[in-house]
Amino acid sequence: MFEFQVVHREHNGHARLGRLTTPHGIIETPVFMPIGTCGAVKGLTPAQLLDVGTTILLANTYHLALRPGHQIVADLGGLHRFMAWDRPILSDSGGYQVFSLTTLTDIDDAGVTFRSHIDGQTLRLDPARAVVIQEALGADVIMAFDQCPPLPAEPPALQAAVDRTVRWAAQCKQSQTRTDQALFGIVQGGLDLDLRRRCLDALVNIDFPGYAVGGLSVGEGPEQMAAFLADFAPQMPSDRPRYLMGVGRPIDLVRAVAAGIDLFDCVLPTRNGRNAYAFTDRGFLRLRNAQYKRDDRPLEAGCDCYCCNHFSRGYLRHLFLAGEMLGPILVSLHNIAYYHRWMRRIKQAIADGTMNRLIGRARQAAAQENSNDEAPEC
Amino acid sequence: MFEFQVVHREHNGHARLGRLTTPHGIIETPVFMPIGTCGAVKGLTPAQLLDVGTTILLANTYHLALRPGHQIVADLGGLHRFMAWDRPILSDSGGYQVFSLTTLTDIDDAGVTFRSHIDGQTLRLDPARAVVIQEALGADVIMAFDQCPPLPAEPPALQAAVDRTVRWAAQCKQSQTRTDQALFGIVQGGLDLDLRRRCLDALVNIDFPGYAVGGLSVGEGPEQMAAFLADFAPQMPSDRPRYLMGVGRPIDLVRAVAAGIDLFDCVLPTRNGRNAYAFTDRGFLRLRNAQYKRDDRPLEAGCDCYCCNHFSRGYLRHLFLAGEMLGPILVSLHNIAYYHRWMRRIKQAIADGTMNRLIGRARQAAAQENSNDEAPEC
């Protein structure tokens, strides 16, 4: 029901092409997962997602547990039926949101007490409950409940988070009752390679069908993250899928794949899309800019997405200025198409043995981006 | 390039099946036109509109002239290219919006001075300019600039509006330079049958390829409107398309078709869709209601729209409560599909000679709707 196969290795043997088999289908890795926080990728239908090549979605346990409630999702047939997405889904554990979105009232060794960001209600999340919720939701891949400290963090705080994360991972595994879901462990430990390694070893000892790197892109810079991953990712079990949580920009993705990462999720394509930022090979288009007023070109020449096939930059700019929903919809669609195309290029570069060239191109594009005065909303 | 053929008459010879030929294709009438106010039907792509059977769209001259400006639309290839809709489009004249949306500063016999609802700028619209703008936009059907007084109105006010409307219609016709657009005249005159008839006669004297009934659904009740149309519509030239502007509910549509109307536009399906009201044969579903929390049924059994084929009422309710764009998108889509299906049923009833039965059914549904405490947002 669940299987991972590495079908090709390249770039010192680190970058891999893989095939992840789930109850809802097979995913070719490396893969980018668009985010359906509340059970919907903002503004897009499943048909539109399929059309741009999405093969797996991420849904947020924290948000769905609060609203509508995991039991209601279960009563409505589970997440796949609920969202009308019959392909693979990964649910996170809620750990990250509990620490980033709520007013925390208490972290103890057994779990977390917090106030809902929706109505301020006091709630409790712990490893067993995170599994109960994710089993009710019914994603193909579910995640262990972890503690994710923001960076920079003091060594004792990192150590305490790792200790809890490992203990909670074991409890999650013990709590699991469904056999048709793959539970992934999450490695914490900040940028401390030694601490990360001890966390990983403890998780491997428990034995998970996949491992995630959590606690990155939480305050450290992208260069630090890339350097850390180059050292750490190759140490992760090579026969299991490796998932880098919450990352990132195209340059971050290609470098992480070079280090051996297989799965990614990030809000960038949809959040930037809603804010009129379009991804292209030549950097962001900031569509509110007056320069696009009469621009009859598509967002990106050669892009085969519905948006680029039909609409001009001038029209898209107009939609954003007029407050029309269709602007966020179309640019989100293009941005997801861009990310999927980027992953296809990465796969091709692995197959062709040209990863270095692709990384060089991405680095140039990112440098050009950084030289821009106006920072994109990331 | 432009032709109207009545292919079947029924219901005392008043209700008609017709065929309207335009430079962008043939439309079977009676037909409902979804509204793309700012050059987009809110939240929906052209592909989604085609999928639910839309054959012609309405776009608002007032909104597009203010933003992005008709010259920019023209520079970007005209309205069809701008919206990526290569089927027929009808543009209104801006008259209705000038009177309903702006702070009017002056109406004189030559035109209207008003303040933009966007930035308060003082602008001027008159018959010649309304034609210049609509020629730049490039819709297939364009409308004469008229004065639309809200009802009830005093007889002298109605008379003055009719006098201006007739004079302005003649000026519009004289201003027309494009030969690939059909300019329709608009009849005003409130509920005064005699005044309406005089307005109509004056317009027929100018000779337009189509005639619209404006100034209804602006304060009078639906029963008054239906009774007026039953008397007035049959007096309109029977060899020209007849367009009832800004109307209305399904019951209003079937009664107006029975009186001889061919074209309709209304914001109801999209505006109600954005507000979580779904049209069904059994009346509105108010999707925010708790009763739908665990309802796994589609909005309407048997509806073949994308929304009903994939999503439950419970999921749609969740989307609205979570503030997800996908809720307004999906329910707008269903509501437009509902309106097009309703028009297909009306056409079938004309073909079958069963209009009375369909009017009876619609009357019952509307009565049931009215007996509900909670009024839909119309």
Image: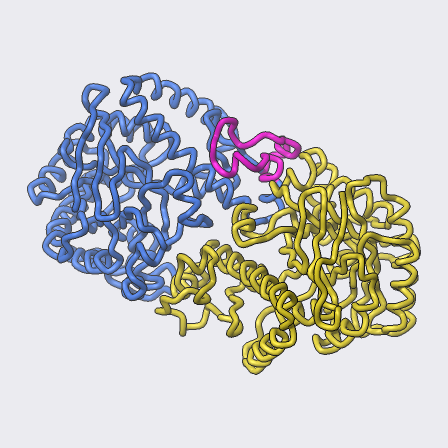
Chain colours: A blue, B yellow
| A118 relative to B56 in the view: left or right | left
Q: Is residue A109 visible?
A: yes
Residue B339, quarter of the rendered image: bottom right
Region of the chain picked out in magenta, as a range? A288-317
Which residue occupies the foreground of this view, B58 or B100?
B58
Task: Tell me the residue at 26%/57% (across/down).
Answer: A137
Which residue occupies the foreground of this view, A137 or B211?
B211
Residue B284 falls inside the magenta stretch: no
Number of residue marks: 0
Residue occupying the far bottom of the picture: B371
Residue A305 falls inside the magenta stretch: yes
| A17 relative to B339 in the view: left or right | left
Q: Is residue A118 above or below residue A290?
A: below
Residue B244, quarter of the rendered image: bottom right
Q: Position of residue B259 (x, y in %)?
A: 74, 70
Q: Position of residue A206 (x, y in %)?
A: 8, 45
Task: Tell me the residue at 59%/30% (across/down).
Answer: A297
Residue occupying the far left of the picture: A205
Q: Is residue A325 visible?
A: no
| B352 relative to B204 in the view: left or right | left
Which residue occupies the foreground of this view, A201 or B152?
B152
Which residue occupies the foreground of this view, B69 or A164?
B69
Task: Tell me the residue at 58%/34% (across/down).
Answer: A313
Q: Position of residue A75 (x, y in %)?
A: 29, 66
Residue B134, quarter of the rendered image: top right
Q: Position of residue B313 (x, y in %)?
A: 41, 65
Quadrant of image for the C terminus of chain A: top left
